[in-house]
Image: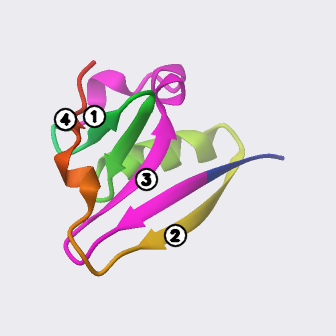
């Protein structure tokens, strides 16, 4: 079984799964991502409530095992200041 490691970032108010932009496009999810996800460089930060689940379900449907590595902070995450995701 194929595996993918993804980082899950969270602050006291929300969380995001970081994934390379290419994967978002390869999974045909770009047009489905909400305005609550962010981007910086070639990394997309998918918000935890909807967008991250779209990715996780798409990966699992393809038989890919997901390993989430958690990174938490008790402060305001800098992810909130990144650009909103745009196709």
Give the image location of residue 77, x and y in percent: 26, 63
Gap between marks 1 and 2 measured at Cα: 22 Å
Is label 4 in a helix, a strand or a loop?
A: strand
The residue labelled by disc 2 is 70
Residue 13 part of the magenta-drawn span = yes
Tell me: 83 left or right of 32: left
Residue count near mark 4 (Cα–Cα under 10 Å), binned few <14, some 14–19, many ≥20: some
Tell me what residue is drawn at x 25 percent, y 43 percent.
37
Residue count near mark 3 (Cα–Cα under 10 Å), binned few <14, some 14–19, many ≥20: many
Is label 2 in a helix, a strand or a loop?
A: strand
Tell me: 60 left or right of 36: right
- Counting residues from the start of the chain, the first of labels 1 and 4 encountered is 1
Residue 48 part of the magenta-drawn span = no
Gap between marks 2 and 4 measured at Cα: 22 Å
Gap between marks 1 and 3 measured at Cα: 13 Å
Is label 3 in a helix, a strand or a loop?
A: strand
The residue labelled by disc 3 is 17
Tell me what residue is drawn at x 41 percent, y 63 percent.
9
The residue labelled by disc 4 is 84
Whether pointer 2 and pointer 4 mark residues with C-beta atoms closer than 8 Å, the reply is no
* Magenta region, residue range: 6-33
Tell me what residue is drawn at x 28 percent, y 72 percent.
11
Q: Which one is nearer the viewer's eye here, 71 or 26?
A: 71
Closer to viewer: mark 1 or mark 3 = 3
Gap between marks 3 and 4 measured at Cα: 14 Å
The residue labelled by disc 1 is 33
């Amino acid at each position: 079984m194929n595996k993918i490691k993804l980082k899950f970032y969270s602050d006291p108010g929300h969380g995001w799964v970081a994934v390379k932009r290419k994967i978002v496009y390869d999974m045909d999810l770009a047009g489905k991502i909400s305005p609550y996800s962010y981007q910086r460089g070639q990394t997309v930060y998918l918000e935890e409530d909807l967008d991250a689940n779209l990715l996780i379900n798409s990966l699992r449907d393809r038989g890919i095992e997901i390993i989430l590595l958690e990174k938490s902070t008790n402060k305001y995450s800098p992810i909130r200041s990144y650009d909103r995701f745009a196709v």
